[in-house]
Amino acid sequence: MGGLILAIDQGTTGTTSALFDTKGNLKAKVNQEFRQIYPQPGWVEHQLNDIWTSVEDSIQKVLQSGSFDVKQIRAIGITNQRETTAVWEKDSGQALANAIVWQCRRTTPFCQQLKDAGHEPLFQERTGLVLDPYFSGTKLRWLLDNVPGLAQRAQKNEVCFGTIDSFLVSRLTDGQAHVTDVSNASRTLMMNLHTLAWDDELLELLGIPKSLLPEIRPSAEIYGRTRGLRSLPDGIPVCGIAGDQQAALFGQTCFDVGQVKCTYGTGAFVLMNTGGRAVTSKQGLLTTVAWKIGDEVVYALEGSVFVAGAAVQWLRDGLSLISQAAEVEKLARQVDSSEGVIFVPALVGLGAPHWNPNARGVISGITRGTTAAHLARATLEGIAFQVRDVIEAMRKDAQEDIRVMRVDGGAAENDLLLQFQSDILGVDIHRPKIIETTALGAALLAGLAAGIWQDKEEIRNHWEIDQPFAATMTADQVSELLSRWEAAVTRS
């Protein structure tokens, strides 16, 4: 039986709507960008109506792109920017404030207060996370403290909190469902990793009423059905949810313990499947829920690099060295090496394994002979160095040997980046034919819930390699590069 699966990939800078057939083939995709709001340095916001408009517009455009019959859509899967924090009115669904984006650093002082009070070990043990402004719990506390009347309305049970998946399910179903899945809930600082339930003690420390929170559900089941939309008919099951990085792990069919993927997007995100074991990191990584399907819970270790593709955007928008992000590889290939130039792209602090919100970008090794091409190459290398730091931490935590890393995301089309990544890691890099693996993961989860596929083994065969990259550098070359990188990081 044929049909289509609609995947909504709600990202940081835009929404991609993608249509997949029942063999997992990508039939069409459309991306719709929306506004980024920067009220002051280090703060990032989105307007929920902008996000919702981008969702409806991208759905309409992807359906029009190939004259697809909307009646063929059998399931809808959602994947999303994860920690971004939204509040809306329970009755009307209307936004009560701008969403605070995962990149936003405004809650740094509150995180420090919690650390100073000695609470970080408890949060880490219960949630697998560190006390960093990245996560949703402190963002929600900030909204309750700073949006006039919000705390009072929350006490009256008039307010819904959610990450963007929750908001989208609510809108798609005309308010029928206030839910999230375990992968998104595990990014909030509020869910207990071991019980998969909201943790009362952590909620008390954060000062958050439980009534605000969505119901935590598995990653593949029917949450509700479409109702009252301009872009879709009523009655289509909304039935797969995973945070973007977990969806990419699923879309890469990393179903076995020890398998690793890296997504190169605005940031770079490395996840390792650790199976039913929630590995506690001693190396500054995060423990997260990858997915829950039926009764099976799969955990992952994660390292988050805050700035990856965003560094290339800075070359484009901040320095005007390129006019389009895709031009960076051509510019970087004008030189054979960065000739000692190192760029630590800590433009919004450093993520795993360093967790330094006060770090700032550093460019070192500049000489009179340094050109735009050297800086472009150093930017790509800086992305790869950060990923390498995460992989080394992962190897130590999981006690797993990593031989292959699967890659996806926009920058995974950059051969120069992937070759350098393979060189400094000493592992093979596999780029799949479908690099929209985040959207694919959402589609696969929705297809499982809708009965299109029976189990994970049936969909494992849908993954195909496009191009492998193998390490070519000598150990001495790698050692010299790493010593320069580590010296530069200490200056950031």
Image (spheres, rainbow, N blue to C red):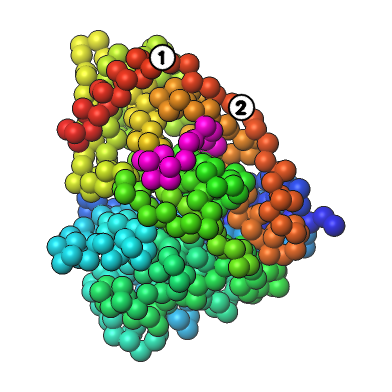
Q: Nearer the viewer, residue 299 or 242?
A: 299
Question: Residue at (54%, 33%) from the top-left corner?
Answer: 404
Q: Quadrant of the N terminus?
A: bottom right
Q: Residues within 10 Å of mark 1 (few under 14, many from 20)?
A: few
Q: In this view of the protein, can residue 58 be seen by the observer?
A: no
Q: Position of residue 172 (x, y in %)?
A: 58, 69
Quadrant housing residue 308: top left
> Which amino acid type corresponds to the residue marked 1 in the rendered image?
Thr
Secondary structure at badge 2 equals: strand
Q: Position of residue 32 (x, y in %)?
A: 53, 50
Residue stretch rendered in magenta on the structure = 393-407
The residue wearing badge 1 is 474
The mark lying in front, picked from 2 and 1, is 1
Q: Position of residue 115 (x, y in %)?
A: 19, 61
Quadrant housing residue 467: top right
Question: Residue at (38%, 12%) from the top-left corner?
Answer: 335
Question: Residue at (70%, 68%) from the top-left corner?
Answer: 236
Q: Nearer the viewer, residue 186 or 371?
A: 186
Q: Is residue 149 left or right of residue 96?
A: left
Q: Position of residue 475 (x, y in %)?
A: 38, 17
Q: Nearer the viewer, residue 336 or 453?
A: 453
> Which amino acid type corresponds to the residue marked 2 in the rendered image?
Gln
Task: In the rendered view, tell whether residue 222 sits above or below residue 319.
Answer: below
Task: In the rendered view, tell whether residue 177 sits above or below residue 462.
Answer: below
Numbered mark located on residue 467 in the image:
2
Q: Is residue 249 left or right of residue 43?
A: right
